[in-house]
Structures are given as structure tokens and as C-alpha cells.
Image: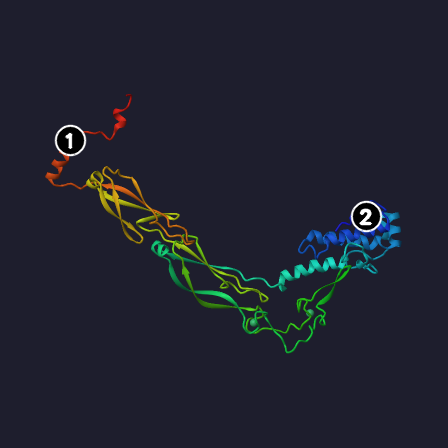
Amino acid sequence: MARRDLYEALELPPKASASEVKKAYKRLARKYHPDLNPKDKSAEERFKEISEAYAILSDPDKKKKYDSYGAAWDSGGEAEKGWDGVRFEGFDFNGQPQGAGGFSDLFESFLGAAQSRKQAAPSQGEDLIYPITVTLGEAFAGKKIRLTIRHTVSCKSCGGTGRIASGGRRPCRRCGGTGKIGLSKGPFSFAQPCPSCHGTGADPGEPCKECGGSGAKEASETVDAAIPAGVDTGSRVRLKGKGQAGSGGAQPGDLYIETHVQPHPLFFREGPHLKVKVPVTFSEAVLGAKIEVPTLSGGAMLKIPPGTASGQVFRLRERGMPSPRGAAPGDLLAEVTVAVPSVVDEKSKELLREFARLNPENPRSYNSSKGS
Ligand SMILES: [Zn+2]
Ligand SMILES: [Zn+2]
């Protein structure tokens, strides 16, 4: 690492005073400390640079030399170079008047948060999603289902803690029951929650053999669920607590059964509504008729008026899908299609020719109306 100017490293003008040096160091060290910038290589480099600059400039003798000779100050043979050679003494972080806790509390709170995120804090288990496929008829009527699921469950042997307490409430061996351990990193010495007992101070015991210390085990479970009438693709039924086990005694996640509704050969679904095509004969369309329309709950009768055209849609109120939320059911939209008679016998053909003579209308009126 090419050594920068030491004052520059502390973001100070050349020959800044000792108190300015100290102030700058505290500010920058707090900003770039590796524990506050995990895995940030550039912050680590910066921190070393700051610490190194401070190591020299905080020493009145060395500062004097540096102020006089610049980078060549130690060419006389002092070996104090680089991170490993840096020593800090008599620097009291707690002495600084900055708010309630001071410097070490700041670090502790940061570290505490980082620690608990990593291992200690109880966290709710993950949710699981189980997809199931149902027919449109099943979605219409609702369905009771039984599923065998695989999920993790809290280990019974250790109560989900991953540890078996080794008799009585002895203090934690690592921290002596204080729940904190001192940590020195470079110039800093501060307390952090004991990783063995997670700051409780109690003996964490031995890792549980049953679950390998994880506190949870993989298990199969049979669950019953009611799929409500009216579900659509993407609808979810929640089974509370049937997801993955929580850690550290926290609640398990939930299990969501997600329905996928198969397409139906007759009915086309549009939200709560169902569409169906109903063929009628030529004479039914011309003369009007009472016809049967299929629904998902048996048949329904529909009266079509005389002169019904192919493609005309009739709405049967509330004969569509039920609502899983208790709202009114959707409608059934019946589209009439006129079936062309497959006439073969001469008698019928003669009658149709007669019909055409009596009704000389032209359905392709766009030809005759042109230019009129
Ligand atoms: Zn401990
Ligand atoms: Zn266990």
C-alpha cells in the first residue's frame, strides 16, 4: 500500500494540531471500523490507513519529526510501520462526551444487532406453499383435502434451542456468566454479547444430538384442509403454524395451499362469471324456445325469444361461481349458437326452398345499401 500523507489520511490540513488529529481519528475510525463494515475491503484498508496515521501523529515526538521531515521522518530506522506494528495505549473511547452511551456503547449496539441477526434472535419460521390442482367442478363445490407435507418441526429433545443444558443453571464457561466478552480488534477493546450463551450468561449446554444443534428436524405430517367453494387459480388457503419451524423458540411459519384450477371443456371462467356456448336449432332460434342450459350445479332452463340470433348472450343471474368470501355468486353467460340443420331428404329441401321464396331477405345488406 502506497502510504499517503498522514494528515491527508485523516482528512486534515498539514500540521493540524494534536487535538484535531485525535478528533479526526475518532470520527473516521468510527466510520470505517471493520466490524461496522463487514466484508468491505476498501473500508478495511481505509481503517488501517487511518489507524496507522494516528499511531504516528498521536505521538508528540513522531508528530514533530513528521511535521519537519514529512514521509522521510522515520528513515532513521524506526521499524514501526504497517498495521501489525501499530500500538495504541491510553486512548479511552469512553471518555468522549458524545451522547448518553459514548463510543463503546455505540459499538456494542451495532455488534449486538449484527450478532442477533446472525444467530441469537428468535425468528419466525418460513412459510411454505403447497400447490394443488382442482377441477372447475371442485372449485365450484369446494373440497376437503388431506395432504402429506414435509416441513421442519421444532426438536422435542431440546425444545428447539439446539442445546441440552448440562444440569442446573451454571454460568456460561466462556464469559463466566457475565454474558459479555471483551474483544480487541486493532486499537479497540470493547464488549460484545457472548456468542456461546448469546448474552444470557447461562450455561448453553451441549449441542443436541437429536437435531444436530439446529433445534429443528425434518418431518412428514398429514394435514386436513377445506378448500372453499369458488377458489380460483392462485387462491390460497392458510394453515397457521404448518410451515417451517421457527428458531430460538419463535413461532413456526404458515403453510399456504395454493389452488390451480384446470380448464373445463364446456365452461370458460372469467372471474366469478362462467361462459358457456349453447347450440340451438334453426327452428328454435326462429320460433323461440325453452332450452336447457348446462351449469356446474345441474341444468337450468332458459327461454329464448323468437328471432334469436347466433351469438346472442343470455345472462343467468348468480348461476356462475360462488364467492369464497361470501359475496354474491357470479353469473352464467349463455351464448346461443345456431346449429345448421344437416338436411338430406328431398322433402325438407323443398320446404326450405319454399321458405326462402316466402322470405326474400338479404342478410348481406352491405351490398345493396352501398351508395344508397
Ligand atoms: Zn457466555
Ligand atoms: Zn434438538
Residue 86 visible? The answer is: no
Q: Which quadrant does the C terminus fall into? A: top left
Q: On the image, which quarter does residue 89 sit in?
A: bottom right
Residue highlighted by disc 1: 358
Residue highlighted by disc 2: 7
Q: Nearer the viewer, residue 215 or 18?
A: 215
**Residue 223 spot, x, y in % from top left:** 44, 65
- Residue at horizontal 13%, vertical 33%? 354
Q: State the residue lying farthest toward the top.
A: 372
Q: Nearer the viewer, residue 156 or 144?
A: 144
**Residue 237 spot, x, y in % from top left:** 45, 58
| Vertical arrangement, residue 2 with respect to residue 195, above or below | above
**Residue 45 spot, x, y in % from top left:** 72, 53
Q: Nearer the viewer, residue 150 or 271?
A: 271
How many numbered discs? 2
- Foreground mark, 1 or 2? 1
